[in-house]
Image (cartoon, grey):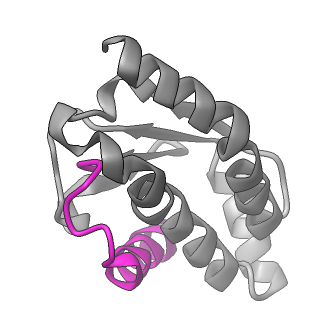
Amino acid sequence: MGLKEKRFSKTFQEEKYPALKEEINKALGFDITIEVAWDTLFEDRFMHLYEDTYPKIYFQPLVFAFTAITVDELGKEALQESLHKIVICNTSDHHNPERAYSFTDGVLTVDFSPVLNADKIEERTDVLQQILENAL
């Protein structure tokens, strides 16, 4: 990760990420540990897109899926008992939600390309919700 990426990452973490993390915690109803492998979320030629794509790919589907699951006490309790940590990374450039989400031993891993199919928020949300509900 070069200086350009480090600057973007630092700015995003300071200016955008706190509000996104708060939205996730609010949707869950509790404070969750989120580990973001920021240095994996870059492809040089797409720097200009990340401010728009990071929320759409990594964070909004979490908020929407958690909101849908926690619509009742049963969902809230199931998530609180089962979900212990969220890991966000890009280790395999997945853009297919069925392969990019995994939930094992209380850890939800979001392993997505930072740019591909960014506007397919609803598709990612639906797949994520289904994966979680099947595992809870």
Residue found at x 66% / y 43%:
17
- Would you say residue 111 is visible in this rendering? no
Residue found at x 84% / y 63%:
29
Residue found at x 31% / y 27%:
40
Residue found at x 64% / y 80%:
69
In this rendering, the answer to whether 67 lies above or below 7 is: below
Q: Is residue 99 left or right of residue 16?
A: left
Near-viewer residue (68 or 7): 7
Which quadrant of the figure has residue 33?
Answer: top right
Q: Position of residue 113 (x, y in %)?
A: 23, 48
Magenta segment: 112-135
Which quadrant of the figure has residue 98?
Answer: bottom left
Which quadrant of the figure has residue 58?
Answer: bottom left
Magenta-colored stretch includes residue 133: yes
Near-viewer residue (20 or 124): 20
Magenta-colored stretch includes residue 34: no
Near-viewer residue (32 or 79): 32
